[in-house]
Amino acid sequence: MKDTLLDLQDIQKSYDATPVLAGVSVTLSAGETLALTGESGSGKSTLLHLAGGLDQPDAGRVLLHGQDIGQMDDTARAEARRLHIGLIFQQFNLVPSLTVGSNIALQARLAGRHDAAFCTTLGHRLGLSDLTTRYPEQLSGGQQQRVAIARALAPKPALILADEPTGNLDEDTGDAVLSLLLDLVSETGAGLLMVTHSPRLAGRLSRRIHLSRGALAAA
Ligand code: ADP
Ligand code: MG
C-alpha cells in the first residue's frame, strides 16, 4: 500500500455563512502529483490553505502523516508547516531585503535543516547559480519563481503545495518552470498538490481533480 501523505476528510468551510467547501475529501500519496482545477472563486485556494495548515476547516479532518493539523493550535500548525510543507504562490512572495541565496536558504534555516550543499544543487538545477547575490527586484518573474521553488524544496518537505505557481508567467516560461518543479518533486519523492485553472497544465500531473460548487467532480 502506498504511503498516504495528505488525507483530507469531508472538509467543510464557509465564509460569512456562504459555503465554499461542502464536504471535500481527497488523498495524496508520497511521490504523487495532483492537479486541482476549478473556476475562479470555486475554492481552490481555500482548499490549498487548509491542506497547508494556513487556515482551519469548520468541519472535517486535515491529516498530514496521519496527524490532524486542522485541530492543532496556531503554534503547532506553524511547526508542522515548517517541518513538512513547502509552499509556492503565484506572487512568488520572496523576501525583498534578502539575496537570492538567502531567500533559497530561508525556509530550511527556519526548519533547522539548512543544507548548504543541497541549496547549491537546487540553485544549479534551477539555473540560479549566477544570481545568488542578487535581490528579488533584480530578477525576472520566471527567475523569481525558480527562487521560490528552490526555497520551498530546500528543507526537503514531504508535501509541496503550489497555488497557480505559473499564473504570473508567460506560457513558455511557465512551462519551463513547471518542468523543473515536476523534475525536482519526482527526484525528492515529495507529494505535490498544485492549483491551476489550466487543463493543459493539469494534464502534466499524474492525477487531476476538479472543484465545482463546493464539491469535487470528476475531471
Ligand atoms: P479560487 O482560488 O478557486 O479562485 P478561493 O478559494 O480564493 O477561490 O475563494 C472561494 C470563495 O471564498 C470566493 O467566493 C471568495 O470570495 C471566498 N473567500 C476566500 N477567502 C475568503 C476570506 N478570507 N474571507 C471571505 N471570503 C473568502
Ligand atoms: Mg485562488
Image (cartoon, rainbow, N blue to C red):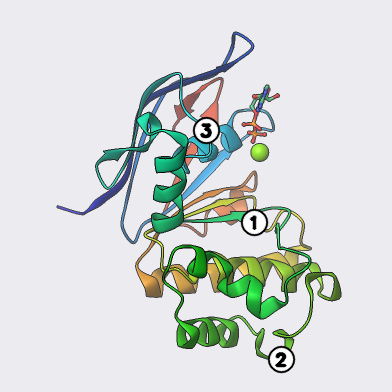
Which residue in the protein does label 1 denote? 165
Residue at the image position 70 percent from the left and 77 percent from the top: 100
N-terminal label among 3 and 1: 3
Q: Could you tell me residue 119's position as x and y percent?
A: 52, 81
For label 3, the SS is loop
Q: Could you tell me residue 152's position as x and y percent?
A: 53, 64
Q: In the rendered image, is residue 135 in sight?
A: yes
* Residue 37 found in image quarter: top right
Give amino acid for label 1. Pro
Please determine whether, in this image, residue 198 is positioned above or below residue 182: above
Q: How many marks?
A: 3
Which residue in the protein does label 2 denote? 130
In the rendered structure, find residue 55 and report the number of the disc placed on it: 3
Please determine whether, in this image, residue 97 is positioned above or below residue 197: below
N-terminal label among 2 and 3: 3
**Which of label 1 and label 2 is nearer to you?**
2
Q: Residue furthest left?
A: 1
